[in-house]
Structure formats: structure tokens, C-alpha cells
Amino acid sequence: MPSYSQSGGLQPLVYSLQQNIRRVMVGKDDVIELMLTALLCRGHILMEDVPGVGKTTLASALSRSVSCSFSRIQFTPDVTPSDVTGYTMMNLKTGDMEYKPGAVMSHIVLADEINRTSPKTQSSLLEAMEEGQVTVDGETHPLPRPFMVMATQNPIDFVGTYALPEAQMDRFLMRLRIGYPSVEEEADVLERYSARQTPMATVGPVCTAEDILRMQDEVGDVYSSPEVRVYIAEISAASRKHPALQLGVSPRGSIALLKAAQATALLFGRDYVLPDDIRRMTLPVLSHRLVLTPEARMKGVTAEQVVQELVGATPVPVKRRA
């Protein structure tokens, strides 16, 4: 996948964020840019990958670059919903009930190995991800803004994992894979970490939370033509009829694709969406929302292959000249 930076046109603020995170993430420009796209959409990311490729580093570098709070939840079978959302307890001095915030009360939350905890604990994140708030003992507590969940999970065939339900998967704007670095990139990583000061220590804030909130508001001002919206609807409708799919793209998925395309246009400095913006976002935004039929899985068909087929079979809208 080509990088935005290879083509130029990145917004200055986003470019500064990208360059800052590149101090600790080598050769992963496409992942960084997709993460920033999700941030501008007020979206959340699910990262499926093996341990040690930089998932925690990526989330920490983002929080440092935006001068935001960061928390990590290491999910295990004994983690409870109250560990995530918080709980109320009595103040022995005053006799009042007080709310004790959980780990979710941060701008950037890394939900590490989310599929190693029980479905009940997994679902404790649903309200936070969808509504930007948590409700504990009937009282609602707003989350900091901006707010973003970056969850990681092992392949579901690993021992001791619980597959995320479709409703939970649908809450993630994108699914990303970082992947192993090349030999040259790994040698560069080793050089950086051979110094006395670690690369993370050199990462400092290049923008404020208010800057991100302003850009998030600008995403909604990016124009999408009726033809572009129909294009998205046709891709989604085709997924619901595809013989290899048991579950196609939901309307929430269509909205997510539109928002991601709007953010992509904004990153390029445009105030309108192109079909190319949509085509670029289909794989990270749609593939994790599809459920293959048992027959398709037995044949080795992947959701990514189905998405590529859907995009290839859907005519690209062309605006006719008067």
C-alpha cells in the first residue's frame, strides 16, 4: 500500500504528527497514516498481530505527540468490567459515594489482547466506544476528548482466546496489521535503540488535544457528492448478496467508510471526497465487518479477497459533463 507521504499533500499538522511518530516506528508510514485517519474520524482501531511488532509503541507515541493521557489495559480472564469502567465506593470520611475512574478514563486507551478476556468484560467497552461515556451504578461519566481505543488481539485460533462478537467488531473503524519489518528496517530499529537514550524519550507533543478536536470537526465539512454516497451504498449492498458471506456490511459500516473517506480527503487538503478515497479505505474499514460462510472458510477464502472482489465489481462513479 503506498504511503500518503510519497504523494505529498498531507496537512501540516498531520504531517508533523507522522514525522514525530516515525522517530519510533520505522517503515510503517501506511499504518501511521491510517491510525491518524481513524483519530480524525473519532474512530477506534483493532490491531491483529503477533507480540513485539510495536503496537504499544505506536499507541504511546501517538499519545505523547498529541499531549494526551494514555492508559494500557492488559486483558486477562480475571479482568472485570469495573476494572475498565471504574466503580463507586463510600468515602469513609464524608459518608458519600464517590466514583473511582477505571482505566478507560484516558484520551488514548490501549486494550491489549482484548480477546483474552471474557465477553462480559469485552462488552464493557461498547458504551465508551460508541457514546464517549461510561455508566456506573446509574451515573453517567463523560470520557476525555479526543478519545480513542486501540485494541490488539491474537489470532482467534490461539489457545485461551474469546472471539469478539460481531457487535463489538462493528464498533472498530479499522482493522490494521503492522507486520514484521524488513531486514533494513529492523537494522535501523536496532541502531536507534543502541543509543543511550531510547527513541521514545525524544518524542514530545507537536499539537494539542484542541488541535485534534478542531480537525475532527472539519471532517464533517468535507463534501461527498450523491454519486459517491451511492457508490458506497452499492458496495455495501453487494456484500449482503455475496455467496461467500454470511453477514455483509451494515449501515454502520457504510457510515464508517464515508467518514474514513472524508478524513482521507482532509489529509490531502481537499474539501471533497473522490472515489479513490473510498477505494483506499475499503480494506481497513470493511474487511473485519464481514462474516464468511463455513463453506468459504473451508475453501480458504478471506474477507480481504471478498472486499477486493466487491470493489472490483462495483462501477466507479464518473461525473458526466454537461
Image: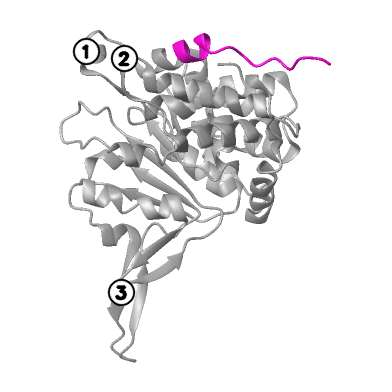
Badge nearest the viewer, 3 or 1: 1
Question: Residue lying furthest left in this view?
Answer: 159
Answer above or below: position of 100 versus 21.
below
Residue 191 visible: no
Quarter of the image where one finds residue 286: top left
Answer above or below: position of 133 versus 205.
below
Residue 88, which numbered label?
3
Residue in the picture at 60% in, 16% down? 2
Answer above or below: position of 138 versus 278.
below
Front-most of residues 50 and 153:
153
Image position, residue 297 (x, y; %): 24, 15
Label 2 is placed on what type of residue? Ala
Q: Which residue is mark 2?
A: 244
Prevailing SS of the magenta stretch: loop
Assign the N terminus to one quadrant of the image. top right
Answer above or below: position of 167 versus 310.
below
Q: Earlier in the sequence, mark 3 or mark 1?
A: 3
Front-most of residues 87 and 234:
234
Residue 14 visible: yes
Front-most of residues 169 and 185:
169
Image position, residue 269 (x, y; %): 76, 32
Q: Earlier in the sequence, mark 2 or mark 3?
A: 3
Front-most of residues 130 and 293:
293
Q: Which residue is mark 1?
A: 295
Assign the C terminus to one quadrant of the image. top right
The residues bearing labels 3 and 1 have C-alpha atoms spaced at a distance of 48 Å
